[in-house]
Amino acid sequence: MIYSLLVMSSPASGQCATTAAQFARAVLARGHSIKRVFFLDKGTSSGSAMAVFPQDEADRLAPWVELAEQHQVELILCIASALKYGMLDATEAQRREKPAATVHPAFSVSGLGQLVEAASAADRLITFGG
Amino acid sequence: MVAAAPKRLLLLIRHSPYGSSLARASLDVALAAAAFDQPVTLLFAGDGVLQLLPEQDTHARGVKNIGRLLASLPLYGIEQVYVDAQAVAHYQFALDTAPLKAVPLDSGQISEMFRNHDQLLGF
Amino acid sequence: MNVILHTLNASPASSACSDCLRLLASGDALLLLGDGVYAALAGSADRARLDASGAAVYVLDTDAAAAGVLSRVDGVTIIDIDGFVALTEQCSRQLAWY
C-alpha cells in the first residue's frame, strides 16, 4: 500500500514526533511505500539542522535523515509553518535575508498543495498530532 | 497533479481559534484542498466550535482574524460545514450569528459522517 | 473494511478523550499513545468508559512503558510500532485525537 504521513507534533515536546519516524520506518519494513511525509505547524521543527538534544536521549533528526537518504522518502515542511518556526532552507534564508539556513538538506520546504497531493495519492493517510 | 477520483476529505477541527496555531493550519489545509478541487468537509467539535463565535476582533492583538477567514470559505467552494451540537450547547451560544453557516449534528450523525469520508484529518 | 482506527494522544481528563470515546463506533479500533495510555489504567473510571465503548483497545508499548503503566493495563492489547502499522493496514481510515 501507499502511505502518506502528516506530522504536526513537535520533536521537542511529547513522544509523537518520534513515534511518527518509527512508524515510517515500520511502514517500509512491512513492504509498503511512502509517498511523502508532510510536516505542518509545530511538526516543521523536525527538520531543524540546529536543534541539539541531550546526548543521553534519542536523536530526533537522524531517523528522518535516514529515511530520506537510504529509502528516498520525501520529507516536506509546510512553508507557512516553517517560516514561523524559523525553519528556512538555503533559498528562503537568502530570500528573507537571514544569516543562515536552519533546515537540514534531507527536507524540502513547500506549500500545502504537496499535502493535498500526497493525501490524494495515498491508500493510507496517517496523522500524528499532539 | 491530483488523481482522477478525488478522495473525500473530512477535517475534524477541535482547537480554539487563538490558543494555538492549529486553527489557522487546519483552515489553510481546507483552502489548499479546495484549490486543488478536492472535496472537503469541515466538522467543528470541542473547543473548535469557539472559532464560530461572532464578533472576533483581533485588531489590537495583531493576528489574523479566524472568524473573518471562516466567513471567506464559501468563496472558495467550501460549503460542507458541520458542528458538534453538544459542544455548541456546552458553550451556550447560538449558531445563527456565526461567521460561517454550520449545520449542527448529534453524536450518531458525526459517527456516520466519519464513515462517509475517505480520509480523516484531526486538528 | 469500514472500521476506523482512532489514535488518542491526550490525557483521559481532556475533551479530546471524552469526544473520542463518545464519537467512536462500537467495533472501531482505538490506539492509545502518549498521554492517552493513562486512559487504560485498570480500575479507573476512564478505563471503565473505554471498556464500555465497544472499541478494540490497544496501547503503544514504548509510551506505556515510559509512563510506568505496562503492568496496570490488563485487558488491553499492548502493541509495538509494527503492530501500529498492522492496524492501519486493517483500517482504511485513521483519525487522530489530541
Image (cartoon, rainbow, N blue to C red):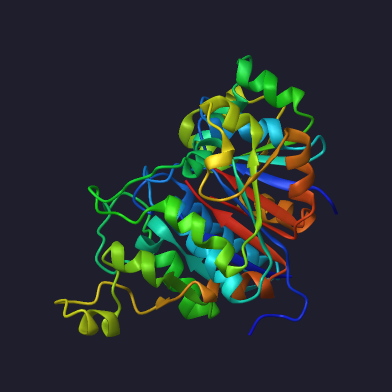
Residue closest to the eye, B99 or A67: B99
In the image, taking residue A65 as reference, residue A6 lies left or right, namely right
Residue A102, image x, y percentages: 26, 72
Q: Position of residue C36 (x, y in %)?
A: 55, 34
Give percent across and percent down for residue A92: 28, 80
Q: Quadrant of residue A121?
A: bottom right
Q: Residue at x 62, y 33 (%)?
A: C19
Outermost residue toward the left in this view: A99
Identity of the residue furthest to the right in this view: C1
Residue B68 higher or lower than C53, as above or below: below
Looking at the image, which is closer to me, B99 or A29? B99
Measuring 68% from the left and 71% from the top, which residue is drawn there?
A: A122
Which residue lies at the image location 46% right of the left edge and 79% below the top edge? A69
Q: Is C30 located above or below residue A43 in the figure?
A: above
- Pick whichever, B121 or B30, lies toward us: B30
Left or right: residue B52 versus residue A32 is left
Q: Say which quarter of the image contains residue C21.
A: top right
**Split into 4 quadrants, where in the image is the N terminus of chain A?**
bottom right
Q: Is residue A95 above or below residue B60?
A: below
Pinpoint residue B36: horizontal percent, then vertical percent.
61, 77
Q: Is the residue C67 above or below the residue B11 in the image? A: above
Count up the numbered dots: 0
Examine the rendering and report whether any part of residue B111 can be seen: yes
Q: Position of B120 compared to C14: left or right?
A: right
